Amino acid sequence: MSGIDYLERIPNNVDLAANRRLLRALEEWQPKFLDWWQAMGPEGLQATDIYLRTAVSVDAQGWAQFGYLKMPEYRWGIFLAEPEPNRAIAFGDHKGQPAWPDVPGEHRATLRRLIVTQGDTEPASVEQQHHLGRTCPSLYDLRNLCQVNVEEGRHLWAMVYLLDAHFGRDGREESEALLQRRSGDRDKPRILGAFNERTPDWLSFFMFSFFTDRDGKYQLASLAESGFDPLSRTCRFMLTEEAHHMFVGETGVGRIVQRTCELMREHKTDDVRRFGGIDLKTMQKYINFHCSVSLDLFGSEVSTNAANFYTMGLKGRFEEAKKPDDHQLKDATYSVIELDGDRAAAREEPALVSLNERLRDDYIADCARGLQRWNETIKRHGIDVELTLPHRGFHRAIGCFAEVKVSPDGRIISEAEWDARHHDWLPTAEDQSFVQSLMQPVVEPAKFASWIAPPARGINGKPLEFEYVRLG
Ligand SMILES: [Fe+2]
Ligand SMILES: [Fe+2]
């Protein structure tokens, strides 16, 4: 078991004290991070006691400790998963060679870009969720929001560590820039589109945690395969935290579905808005939106960048070791769904340039499993409705489908049809203001808003009536 040294000013398991130069760089960055956190972390909650989980060791078993904490006292720091002795690179041109403890000179710029792009998403989601604490549906949910946010803050630390430890002066400049961009800002936006969208209500938050944090899981899992060993170890530990974010998303949406079904049965109507619920049609529109903007995060279907990242040994596939092939893919092909005239059709492409699409396929299959669980809830209530994932070409801004209009069921349609129908497929201003109208804070222990069912169980074995946040 590898403990984290909390006596250090910056908690870590990388023996930071022995590296004066790095320690100094991080000590200089820390107050700027705290300023950013005070400004952009959960609004109005910085002096509040919250029942949070903190990592105390990095092994799979006993790494979490629960207790009341004010968020600015959260012990952000640098935690890498245990090194794998004699780890070898598993794929690409360097397959079989020892993993790199340092950045190889020829891959320096590319690796830095990959790390900055990942790092940029972490503070972005905190910024997107800045106002949500004001309208929490329960103390339980408020606590989960804060937990997700402090962990996203730590993910930023994880990437800044890599930049400061391995990229010298330009790494330090990138670390500063990560605190200067702002989600949705016109002049200094975050790097990726989905991280500049608004998260104005809790339905959006749960959808974001389900769809967009899951993109994070797939990106981190492929970076965890990296030949650059510090990146691999950093991402492996981040994945343990990411799992909780997706749990919050899946159970959050699942509880809304549950509540909607209860109201539908009780009042014998699909139109549960009148009874303070979110109708399934609106839920479907939110799924369509959040799924499509998250699909964009995987990039173009056919991408030489993706091929290069793989061949260079920088970014692998999801569960690389489990794939039964030569892990170099020079002669392999992969079936990619592309635009073919006026329809979407599968075409064989070289496997190397198709790696974005392969990761997107893994992601879509994972999302589908979550939807299946929501649909089981609907079925259990005897309701004949199914929530579905939109076609991968629907509402895309990146890749071949960005050029055309696609319906959720995958038909390439005219602009005129899109104009006539998109209100049925994506949240309208009216849908959004209805959802917003439900966002009245519920802050009594054990109480939940009208539109969401209580969770099956509390946090860390605590009952639902536990005071997860002491609003005082
Ligand atoms: Fe994250
Ligand atoms: Fe996350």
Image (cartoon, rainbow, N blue to C red):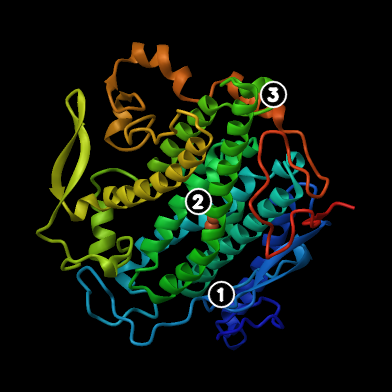
The secondary element bearing badge 3 is classed as: helix
The secondary element bearing badge 1 is classed as: loop
First of labels 2, 3 by sequence position = 2
Residue at numbered disc 3 = 275
Which residue is found at the position 22% from the left and 64% from the top? 311
Q: CA distance from mark 2 to mark 1?
A: 20 Å
Pointer 2 local density, CA inside 10 Å: few below 14, some 14–19, many at least 20? many
Q: Does residue 352 lie above or below 31 as drawn?
A: above
Q: Does residue 195 lie above or below 72 as drawn?
A: above
Work out whether residue 143 or residue 314 is closer to the camera in this orientation and state it. Answer: 143
Q: Residue 127: where, in percent of width, then height? A: 63, 46
First of labels 1, 3 by sequence position = 1
Q: Quadrant of the N terminus?
A: bottom right
The answer to whether the residue bearing label 2 lies less than 8 angstroms from the nearest atom of ligand 2 is yes
Residue at numbered disc 2 = 213
Q: Residue 220: where, in percent of width, then height? A: 43, 61
Of marks 2 and 1, the one in the foreground: 2
The amino acid at mark 1 is Phe
Quarter of the image for residue 233 reads bottom left
Work out whether residue 123 or residue 444 is closer to the camera in this orientation and state it. Answer: 444
Q: Residue 389: where, in percent of width, then height? A: 39, 36
Judged from the image, the quadrant occupied by ligand 2 is bottom right
Of marks 2 and 3, the one in the foreground: 3
Pointer 1 local density, CA inside 10 Å: few below 14, some 14–19, many at least 20? many
Quarter of the image for residue 269 reads top right
Q: Are marks 2 and 1 in contact (CB under 8 Å)?
A: no
The amino acid at mark 3 is Phe
The amino acid at mark 2 is Asp
Q: CA distance from mark 2 to mark 3?
A: 31 Å
Quarter of the image for residue 19 reads bottom right
Residue at numbered disc 1 = 79
